Amino acid sequence: MQRAEDMSIGRRIGALAFLATAYILYSWSWNTVDVLRPYIADDLDLSLTQAGSLYSAQALGALAGAVINGQLADRFGRRNALMAVMVGFGTMLVLGTLVTSYMQVLGQRFLLGYFTGSMYPITVGIYASLFGPAVRGRVASVIMGSSYLAVSLLGFASATVFSLGYDWHLLLWVGVIPIVMAAFAPLVVPNDRKMIAHGAAAHDEQRASGFPIKELFSPALRKRTIMLTLVSGLNFFAYQAFTGWATTYLRDERGWSDSAIGVSVSWMFAGSLLGGFFWGWVGDRFGRRSAAIGFFVTAALILVYLYAPISQMVLNLVAFSYGACLACSVVWGPWLAELYPHHLKSTAASIFNWGRIVSFVAPLITAQMAEAFGLSLTMTLASVVFALAAIIWMRLPETHRYVPSPRAVVAEAAIQPRI
């Protein structure tokens, strides 16, 4: 058994680079359901309802994959699970070139979701074992940034493919890359079954047995697990209630053009990309619960976005700030891993995806509310829900205490009386 602390920083950064690349490919695969939706619908002659149900099938698969594969990763090895999942989602993406009916594409999207939904808990389990708590937030921000980068790459690649007159199915052949990459994981990613996680003692590295998820609901951990699931669910609901309706609001309530709406969405995405690095630093410096401030600010910005008489430029700045504050959840990866025993890291990280079950019903609930009370008032609900999520977040245990900057340590030492 080798201690993670004894591994060279170069080897651990190499493993992080591998995980970030795998995460780009995962995010590319996942987001094809949105970016390529109209082309899939045209190819298979799907109705709007059928086309929209592809996301529901994929999200349902993601929930199942997070619960099942997170446990398998803790029991049989996270590197082994990473390799299996990369082969799985790569294969499912390529098989998207062969579907010829609605039922086939529905099954393909469910299985694609099953494998992609496993990437978050498995990735968190690996990097939380390789790096110490003082840098885990910033490590998590690298992974989150990779996910946002993938969306940009997919958008750019789709525009290029269509401009050159190629068929959109070409974008699905990217699935070959993770299949090939998986074979190289043993050369880059340390074997967690033969490694003592960063900060753990040898006796902490027991293997999960039976169904690890049962330990999350043991008497000592049950309340914590339920509260975390609630925070995750509220996050997904609030996101759907506001972000899910943002483009509709700008078009129908503000009367913006399609191009102006696209610019506003880009501002929001850019905010999330940069905000992840900021909140990763905040979580490492001041503790995981300190990032809950992001949800409080998000709640306030929603009210400004909806009701303040501001220009397009200012509203785009508000959208940027909203996206940046929304990224405060980047600290959840390391936080979830730290809240539970070392042998449950991936199972615990899967709690993040448990909240997805709320996203199944959120669009239906908010749509009915919008018809009854108007879109602005419905989107205001997101402000209340984000604030409620932040309050619950603040009531959960802290796992990483305030770390003073080196400059502060030197300054404090300088004013200490000498004896």
Image (spheres, rainbow, N blue to C red):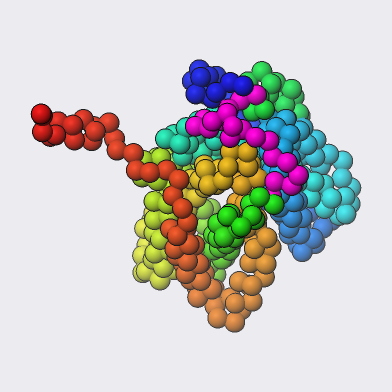
Examine the structure image and report whether residue 192 is included in the region drawn in magenta.
no
| Snapshot quadrant of residue 85 | top right
Placement of 323 over or under 83, stated as above or below: below
If the image is split into quadrants, where does the N terminus sit? top right
If the image is split into quadrants, where does the C terminus sit? top left
Q: Position of residue 188 (x, y in %)?
A: 63, 20
Left or right: 128 in relation to 65: left
Q: Do we see residue 82 in this rendering?
A: no
Residue plotted at (51% across, 19% down): 6
Placement of 369 over or under 64, stated as above or below: below
Residue plotted at (86% across, 54% down): 102
Placement of 237 over or under 75, stated as above or below: below
Q: Which is the main secondary structure of the residues drawn in magenta?
A: loop
Examine the structure image and report whether residue 206 is included in the region drawn in magenta.
yes
Left or right: 397 in relation to 121: left
Residue plotted at (51% across, 53% down): 265
In this rendered view, identify the residue nearer to me: 47 or 295: 295
Q: What stretch of residues is rendered in magenta?
A: 194-213
Residue plotted at (69% across, 43% down): 70
Q: Position of residue 144 (x, y in %)?
A: 54, 41
Q: Position of residue 234 (x, y in %)?
A: 55, 63
